[in-house]
Amino acid sequence: MIHPRAADIEPVPGSAREDWPATNSPHSGRAPSNPAGRAGAPPANSGRGNGWFVVRDATSADNDELIALAAACAMAGDMSLRIDRGPDFFALNRLEGERWQVGVAVADEKVVGCVAASERKAFVNGVEMRTGYAGDLKVHPLYRDTAIADALSHYAERAFAVLPPAAPVIITVLAGNRPMERRLSGPRGVPPFRKIATIRTHSIPILRPRRDRTGNGVRIDAAKWSDVGQMVKLWRKVAPQRQLAPAFTAKSLSAWIGAAPGLDISDYRIARSTAGEMLGFLAVWDQRSFKQLVVFGYSPRMKLVRTAFNAIATMLGAERLPRSGAPLSCVSAAHVCVPSHRPEVLRSLILSAYNDFVGAGCSFMNVGLDTRDPLTAGLVGLLAQPTDVNAYAVTGRRGVAPELLDSRPMHYEIALV
Ligand SMILES: CC(C)(COP(=O)(O)OP(=O)(O)OC[C@H]1O[C@@H](n2cnc3c(N)ncnc32)[C@H](O)[C@@H]1OP(=O)(O)O)[C@@H](O)C(=O)NCCC(=O)NCCS
């Protein structure tokens, strides 16, 4: 058990959290009665009294333990995945918003839990405002069913206290994640949430080249830095029509791209009409330099899908789905910027990127869209496998209800999960 002194705590380099509230506090609550017993090892924490863990701001020194924690918190599902956040756990958090902070729970001198809180300017009902995002809530399996997850939720709650009370604070939860879904009603005084949208990740298998039959005469080119001004002009037309799309300026988008590992301006594709008008754009992001997905199991249904997929992939010389224990190669669409009434433009953008990845060692291209998003029509026939993530907003802070979101489809960057 450690009780870090304030002097021990150094903010993570690059974190703009100086004006965010820091939280370094010992906690009591219920200690795990026999945490390691579940894993067949001797109890690690038995006999601990009050204050058996602390929650504090993360420091760069926590990087390796956070990477190990993320790997220990695997996601079970049709395709069970372990996320390797090496070499830099904080690389994703840095991109979450203009301000961000990570809190860690420390017990037995190890990082056994974490949570991230970030703030970004985004469009809500068409108006730019400050919004909050909580993510990366993880508790090591040996330390679950204790007060740690609650303490981390309160850490995030305190981090958001600097936001105006009506600012929406959002979390996303993989559909079917029961331990997390149980927390959404706000048990034991943790903040309660209400569902606002379902984001569907469409995983498009990359097999054979596909022809663009949209017949819309759209031309697709790789973006250049000189395009950013025009891209942002289009973004600021499209983003207000989508809930929670970040409010970029040319400067902030350029800075974001510059800071995103594995992403270059040339990874953005721009669709233009024959007259040269910019109609839409998106980025296709290979995140393997800082986030690797390792498969550790397939459900019986997915085993069948894999057998069929690999038979076809072998015939076509495409990337096969990996065996258990091996990494999954995929890329994700980011910053999808296409007006809702132009799904065929999205299709042309996706097909252009798809064809570039045929034979490039990638199994899937992931595209995340709100299930209500009319752009989904652009994905018809691409054999996409769906995975749903539900988005929730805190029901109220400091006695004030958050801005109620109207029915515009939500914008969500699946690549930032
Ligand atoms: C999601 C996650 C953080 C939840 O933590 P957890 O320890 O499993 O679950 P909870 O803290 O909600 O607690 C479970 C049980 O512990 C007990 N408990 C929790 N806090 C307690 C407290 N303060 N006092 C007494 N008992 C407590 C309760 O029995 C509770 O069950 P109940 O709410 O049904 O009554 C954890 O399962 C995890 O890390 N999962 C993997 C990563 C993940 O999916 N993260 C979510 C991303 S959105």
Image: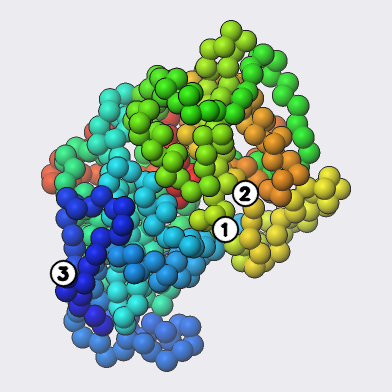
What is the residue that sits farthest to the left in this orientation? 399
- Crowd class of label 3 (few under 14; some 14 to 19; many from 20; radius 10 Å): few
> Tag 1, which secondary structure?
strand
Amino acid on which the number 2 mark rests in the picture: Cys
- Crowd class of label 1 (few under 14; some 14 to 19; many from 20; radius 10 Å): many
User: Eyeballing the image, is 150 above or below 47?
Assistant: above
Q: Is residue 343 visible?
A: no
Q: Identify the residue position indicated by label 3 in the image.
A: 6
Which numbered disc flags the more N-terminal residue, 2 or 3? 3
Query: Would you say 130 lies left or right of 138 here?
Result: left
Q: Identify the residue position indicated by label 2 in the image.
A: 330
Q: What x and y, as percent, mark residue 192? A: 26, 51
Residue at 43% over, 30% down: 409
Query: Mark 1 and mark 2 in contact (Cβ < 8 Å)?
Result: yes
Q: What x and y, as percent, mark residue 321? A: 71, 55
| Closer mark to the observer between disc 2 and disc 3 | 3
Quadrant of the rendered image containing residue 48:
bottom left
- Crowd class of label 2 (few under 14; some 14 to 19; many from 20; radius 10 Å): many
Amino acid on which the number 3 mark rests in the picture: Ala
Q: Identify the residue position indicated by label 1 in the image.
A: 293
Q: Nearer the viewer, residue 61 or 112?
A: 61
Q: How far is the residue under mark 2 from the one under mark 1?
A: 9 Å
